[in-house]
Amino acid sequence: MISVVIVGTGNVAKHLFDAFIQSEKVLVNQVIGRNKSQLKYFEKNTKTSSNFEKAYPSDILILAVSDDVIGELSEYFRKSNALVVHTSGSALKETLSSQRKGVFYPLQTFTEGQKIDFETIPICIEAEDNSDLELLEELASSISGQVFKISSEQRKSLHIAAVYVNNFTNYMYQIGKEICEENNVPFEILMPLIRETSNKIERISPKEAQTGPARRNDRKTLHAQLSLLKKNEHREIYKIMTNTIKAAYGKEL
Amino acid sequence: MISVVIVGTGNVAKHLFDAFIQSEKVLVNQVIGRNKSQLKYFEKNTKTSSNFEKAYPSDILILAVSDDVIGELSEYFRKSNALVVHTSGSALKETLSSQRKGVFYPLQTFTEGQKIDFETIPICIEAEDNSDLELLEELASSISGQVFKISSEQRKSLHIAAVYVNNFTNYMYQIGKEICEENNVPFEILMPLIRETSNKIERISPKEAQTGPARRNDRKTLHAQLSLLKKNEHREIYKIMTNTIKAAYGKEL
């Protein structure tokens, strides 16, 4: 049994907590957070506190907090015997002031109130020595079938790649929705296309999967579409994406 | 039974053909195309020809060809009694020179050799009078459960929105893959995130689903990520997407 204390009460803290309490291999001793109303979420299933100086002893202490307070909060656990880890995609392990340092980064997008199946979520782990890495692997494996030991450099790259495939992609959906709304077409008509776009790259590479007027360098359609776009930001994104795709495929013609 | 002649031998022609021959309500009389080697794909299940002047009689003639030859090829069918339709997202119905004109636009991304389940593909139809529209509706319903009667204006908007949610999104996957490869991280680690990004908007709107450093206006992470990007095109896209997301959410803070 691995004992855990979670510091933080946001989305990542909640989703991790929900996964850990389902596992027979993990015991969440305590959740600590400043926001007392957010602590209510955890009260039924563990002890809670808003006093960072009174953390219960545990094998692992997880700082599930935003990047800019990792360093500051880890000061409270400077003398802790626990392995202290953060859950950030971009912060260095060295941001932590604790004796034993590590990273426990679940590569997924967490939204308030949206349940998620942790079993398929990749968890990227990092520690300073093998025994701590094994401990983190045991914790990660208790909730996920996909555990990866990766370096800080690799984690940073993954986080940047995630910004493109998740944050920027989601904004493409948002623009698609705005264009539909401007023209009284239900956005739902696009859902099968959105599903197939993400499914397709499980079978073939994005490079092979690329289609559309930019890839074909179909100037007539590109020009006509650009002239129909009403919002300046839509036009700017259309231009840069089109030029980039044209350049990427043009070289190959 | 609706009889159909397909003109064209590309991806859309092949995928439509494969769907029609599964349906008991449709008979494909003939496939016509310039490219004799491409015609082989259809030979086992219908008559084929490379002579546009000798189309078999049919209820509907489908021009599944690229936008820039729709007008030219439709000249061959100027006197045809058939309802002549094209499959384009952006071409006007009036591009056709035939007596009876229509549009039969399947809103999906078709890739050579990739099987697709037509049942869930939205088909957007348009015609000049009700009886032709009903005929197209019957044809579309024979292969898909999602048939939409939409105007040329709406179809054009859908096609533009599709460019964002499909073509541009796929290129975001491509960039994600390039960043992974540059840093020796397997792109597959990102697949669950990619799946969840597209699944999430079936439950909540893209606006609510937006997460990430740009939405939070997390300047430290944005700056750090930008400085790690090696390719100029990656940086340019990062900047414009980040600024657009910041502006969209900044207004609301």
Image: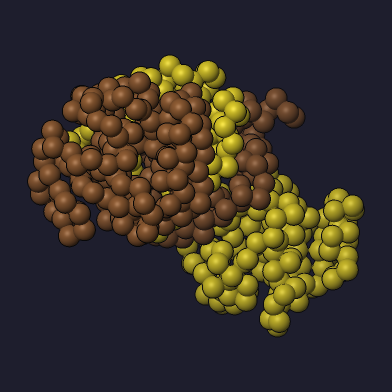
Chain colours: A yellow, B brown
Q: Position of residue B88 (x, y in %)?
A: 35, 33
Image quadrant in which the C terminus of chain B is located? top right
Say whether residue B67 is visible: yes
B206 horizontally vs A14: left or right: left
**Image quarter of residue B97:** top left
| Left or right, residue A84 beside residue B170 | right
Tell me if residue B122 comes above or below residue A149 in the rendering: above
Q: Quadrant of residue B62?
A: top left
Residue at 28% across, 25% down: B98
Above or below — where is A41 with respect to B139?
A: below
State the residue at coordinates (30%, 52%).
B27
Which one is in front, A66 or B45? Answer: B45
Q: Is residue A178 left or right of residue B97?
A: right
Q: Position of residue B232 (x, y in %)?
A: 36, 32
Residue B119, image x, y percentages: 46, 55
How many labels sit on residues? Answer: 0
Q: Give whichever of B149, A238 is nearer the camera.
A: B149
Kindly identify the residue that appears in the image at 39 percent across and 37 percent down: B104
- Whether residue A215 is visible, yes or no, is no
Q: Is residue A219 left or right of residue B36?
A: right
Residue drawn at x 78%, y 55% as measured from the top left: A9
